Amino acid sequence: MATEAVVSPVRIGRLSIGALGILALALGTLQSVVEPALPLLQRELGVSPAEGALVGNTLLITGAVVAPVAGKLGDRYGGKRVLVRLMAVVSAGGLLACLAPNLPVLLLGQVLQGVMVGALPLSFILVRKHLPPGESQLAIGVVMALFTGGGMVGTLFAGPIAEGLSWHWMFALPTFAITATTLVLTRLMPHDPPIPSDERIDWPGMVLLSGTLLTFMLGLVKMTGAGLPPLAVGAIAVAVAALATGWVVVERRAASPMVDLGMLAKPAMWHSCVLTLVITAGFGMVAFLLPQLFAVSADGYGFAADTTDIGLFLLPGAIAGAVSDSMGGIAARRFGLRTVLIVGALVTAGTMVALVSLHTAEWQLVLAKVLAAIGAGLGTTALLTRTATAVGTRDTGIATGLLVVTRVIGVAVGSQVAGAILDAGADSMTGRPAESAFVTGFAVAGLVAALSLLVVRFTKKGTQA
């Protein structure tokens, strides 16, 4: 197989990489359709903002669990073989979501769709095996760019599809593209041989981590929604603690653990995890609050924006996020990690403080999303880059995987807290959040951003360039 890739890399590479790129585009689209359509989904399904936040978070949590193990599975069983099977699961999830009659079925579809995150490391495995080093770097860049581009496509076209057809079709169309492209890849992509290894896949660790995250998020939804009695809250806390403890025990004893717990003891690692959690929690609040405010009826303080308008309003922020994600590492090398983190926190905190009083025009919210995306993108990518270079080469995947999981948890917690704030400030008759609820949400997001400044201050040694 290696000989075949060397003899005819262009013929195999162009067709296969083209299919991988289209698949990445479709996956990015499917991943991003929920954000602009979330107010519409809440109305159609009759759920509260806190429950609606779980729609997007469920996919992210599944992805966070799958991401660290997808590469190991690809190495063990072959990248093509694992990719095709993961895409079958994604297609099943997309089909389930597009047929969902209620929130539980939609959430199950999102759980299955979340394995799409594993497509990226598997695509990189295939590219590296079937193209020379120089061409593989270019191909990886193309795949990543198309995945990001798919996110913009989903943000832009979710509205026209949902309003012109129905919200079911915004899941169906990308799913059809994923299924068709996977069939093409099955024929075009050469089989890559598995890499022999004596290490076992840490299935117990993966199951326990998944259970811990899902139990935590479901408990957070219940606690931040209608509320739970103290006994129920205690039961959820005990369940999360038991699952987390079991995961730690399993990881310590596993010959090849899913996550190397010793990595967390290193200052560069845990400092980055804490900062990433705080930064993304603040951004998660902003990312949830702004679409909700756009959708509020214009007879009070809102803008009565439909799903199409919301997608257009969010598009500049999506572009800014993609650009800042690509520039975080460069900025950290040029100006120092500590400077990037401080500037990002100041920009985000200042933006949230301004939104407390300035949220009466669309351009103010659009600009706020752009600035928040820049601040969060620069900070989290700089931390990711610093961590990847601070650990040994063999530990790069483990370290970056931990930060990916932390980033997902932060966004999920932030959006759930924002949903709870809106629920608490909702009118008992109409169910519409009061303007003061949004003001409170922006103020809390500003405090979270300011908290990251304190974390930088107290972890000074760990945030030096």
Image: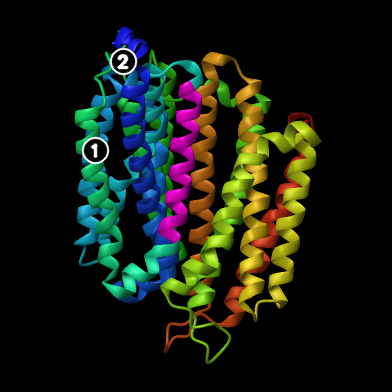
In reply to whether residue 153 is colored magenta, the answer given is yes
Residue placed at 48% from the left, 74% from the top? Answer: 309
Quarter of the image for the C terminus: give it.
Answer: top right
In the rendered view, does 275 fall on the left or right side of 338?
left
Observer-nearest residue: 261 or 122? 122
* Residue displayed at 39% across by 64% down: 157
Q: In screen coordinates, is 463 left or right of 445?
A: right
> Relative to 335, does residue 56 appear above or below in the rendering?
below
Figure disc tally: 2
**16 or 392, nearer to the observer:** 16
Tell me the quarter of the image containing the N terminus. top left
Q: Closer to us: mark 2 or mark 1?
A: 1
Indicate the position of residue 349 as horizontal and vertical percent values: 73, 59
User: In the image, 418: left or right of 222?
Assistant: right
Residue linked to disc 2: 200
Q: Position of residue 153 (x, y in %)?
A: 42, 56
Label 2, label 1: how far apart the Cα atoms are: 28 Å
Residue 198 in sight here: no
Element on which disc 1 rests: helix
Along the viewing direction, whichever of 46 and 130 lies nearer the viewer: 130
Vertical side of 351 occupied by 381: above or below? above
| CA neighbours of label 1 inside 10 A, class few (<14), some (14 to 19), many (20+) | many
Asked whether residue 122 is in view, the answer is: yes
- In the picture, residue 302 is in which quadrant? bottom right
